[in-house]
Image (cartoon, helix red, strand yellow):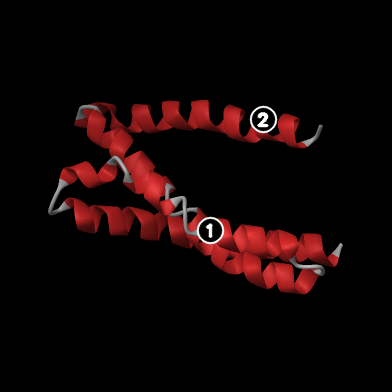
Amino acid sequence: MAVAAGSGLVSGVSGAIPNWAGGLIADRYATRDLRVHGPAPAITALPPIPFCVAALMVGSGPPALVLLVPSQLSGGLWFGPALSSIQGLVPAEMGATASSVSMIVMNPIGLGLGEVEGGR
């Protein structure tokens, strides 16, 4: 129970920061070259991998939670650049619609099918 509460706290507290930071970083680099929005989501998805692997290999809950903090802080960096690139591909008046359609597609696939595969 304590590990679940700690995991929820880590995820909740560190959820918004990487979304904002990822968009800020991608926009800063995009001032030089707009093409940075294409590979940015893939590049920013790489930093959490070693932390996640290390958290899974640790034998107890508290050290795993400590390893999940940098994982959570770097895990959402892809979200800002992804939405930014989606909005950059459509006309300005369609930006909100494009973002909402992408969320409608991403959430059922990522949250729905991910749980089905993980639950087997």
Who's the residue at 81% across and 32% down the image? 120
> Please, what is the three-letter code of the amino acid marked with disc 2?
Gly
Q: Kindly identify which residue carries mark 1.
A: 48
Q: Position of residue 117 (x, y in %)?
A: 72, 31
State the SS at label 1: helix
> Please, what is the three-letter code of the amino acid marked with disc 1?
Pro
**Distance CA(mark 1)–CA(mark 2):** 22 Å
Image quarter in which the N terminus is found: bottom right
Name the side, left or right, on which 13 lies relative to 19: right
Who's the residue at 24% across and 36% down the image? 88
Name the side, left or right, on which 35 lies relative to 115: left
Residue 72 sits in quarter: bottom right
Residue 26 visible somewhere in the drawing: yes
State the SS at label 2: helix
Who's the residue at 79% across and 59% down the image? 4
Q: Kindly identify which residue carries mark 2.
A: 112
Q: Which mark is residue 67?
A: none
Q: Position of residue 68 (x, y in %)?
A: 63, 64
Q: Position of residue 107 (x, y in %)?
A: 56, 33
Name the side, left or right, on which 120 lies relative to 8: right
Does residue 52 lie above or below 66 as drawn? above
Residue 15 visible somewhere in the drawing: no
Does residue 48 lie above or below 111 as drawn? below
Who's the residue at 59% across and 65% down the image? 13
* Residue farthest to the right, as pictured: 1
Does residue 38 lie above or below 20 as drawn? above
